[in-house]
Amino acid sequence: MNEFTESSHMLLTMVIGFCKAVNVLMAREKIIKLIDILVDEMRFSVDSEESKIQEKYDRTIRANTLHYAIMIETSVLSSILNSLLTDLQAKTLPFRAWVPYDCSSSIVFYLTYFYQMISMTACSLFHVAIDALFCGFLLQICCQIDILKCRLKRLNCNGIDDLRKCIQHHYQIYQIAEKMNEAFVMTIFAQFFISSVVLCLSMFELLKNDLLSTEFMALVIYLSTLLVQIYIFCWYGNEVKLKSIHIAVAFAESNWTSLDNSSQKMIVIMMQRAANPIEFVSGYFITVNLDTFMNLIKTSYSAYNVLQKAQ
């Protein structure tokens, strides 16, 4: 059991990164179309207020990507330093692995050692790139919803064309969310399902180490990074859901009383459509929101108790 837990949490982290990379390669055309829609068809601003909204979200995406990359690479660096202080001194590989050659030679050992270090770093870059892409799309959806609300506030009695544009904009937002959910279905599944297993294995491994050891500190940083990685998915997925619900409120708060009967009926229909929030789901049972995050923590803790009893 000890050997299993020592190796499995990093193995499964690699599996998650592999699934994300395969998902992006398979959905490459869909992702390109999503980017084209956001850049060419929907990224136009009527006034300075909409431009400010777009710029605010663009700055947030850039800042989040930078901070997320720093966090992930700090975790990788801590693992590398821990390995240099322990594994390299004992001349053992940082991760248990089968290799088709003899590692007793110093040159072969060092080559294999640095191969594992480079592989871990490359996998971390996969996580940074794909997670930042997914969360960036979520924030762009939030941006489009805020722009739509801004346009609804400007409706007037002569704004039937503006209302039709708002309805078309609302429809496009839902279409983008649907296409995005299809494109990243494997990423969502791998991140939540496999991460729950990694989480409980990491907790099990954490409590076996001494509080003052370098292994303990490296695992704390790794575990914290994993929790943040899951949390940002849930946080921004939850933000999209809440903002999409508030679209109905934005329609109600618009100047709908000054419009004609046909326009008012169109608004009622759109309010009914907005009552169904935008949610990102994988496998019909994994929903990207804060409730899922709490359920994942509870499930991981239950699995950890099972492992502890099995020991």
Image (cartoon, rainbow, N blue to C red):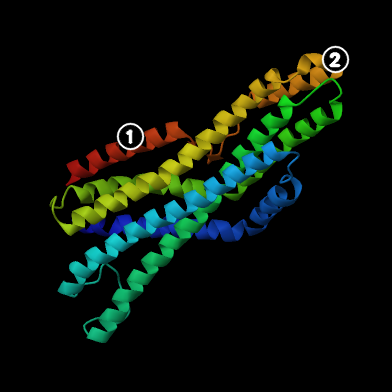
Residue 52 is left or right of residue 74, and the answer is right
Residue 233 is left or right of residue 78, and the answer is right
Secondary structure, mark 2, is helix
Q: Which residue is mark 1?
A: 298
Does 108 appear above or below 30? Answer: below
Mark 1 packing: few (<14 Cα in 10 Å), some, or many (20+)? some
Does 207 appear above or below 120? Answer: above
Residue 291 placed where, x, y %? 43, 31
- Three-letter code, disc 2: Asn
Q: Which mark is residue 177?
A: none
| Mark sitting earlier along the chain (2/1) | 2
Q: Which residue is mark 2?
A: 261
Residue 211 is left or right of residue 141, and the answer is left
Residue 1 can be seen in this image: no
Residue 10 placed where, x, y %? 33, 58
- Three-letter code, disc 1: Lys
Q: CA distance from mark 2 to mark 1?
A: 51 Å
Name the foreground residue: 242 vs 4: 242
Residue 267 image-quadrant placement: top right
Residue 266 placed where, x, y %? 80, 22
In the image, farthest residue toward the front: 48
Q: Residue at x 20, y 57 (%)?
A: 215
Q: Residue at x 40, y 56 (%)?
A: 70
Name the foreground residue: 276 vs 96: 276
Residue 64 is left or right of residue 3, and the answer is right
Secondary structure, mark 1, is helix
Name the foreground residue: 32 vs 282: 32
Residue 225 placed where, x, y %? 35, 50
Does 166 appear above or below 116? Answer: above
**Circle 2 or circle 1, nearest the eye:** 2
Q: Residue at x 64, y 54 (%)?
A: 31
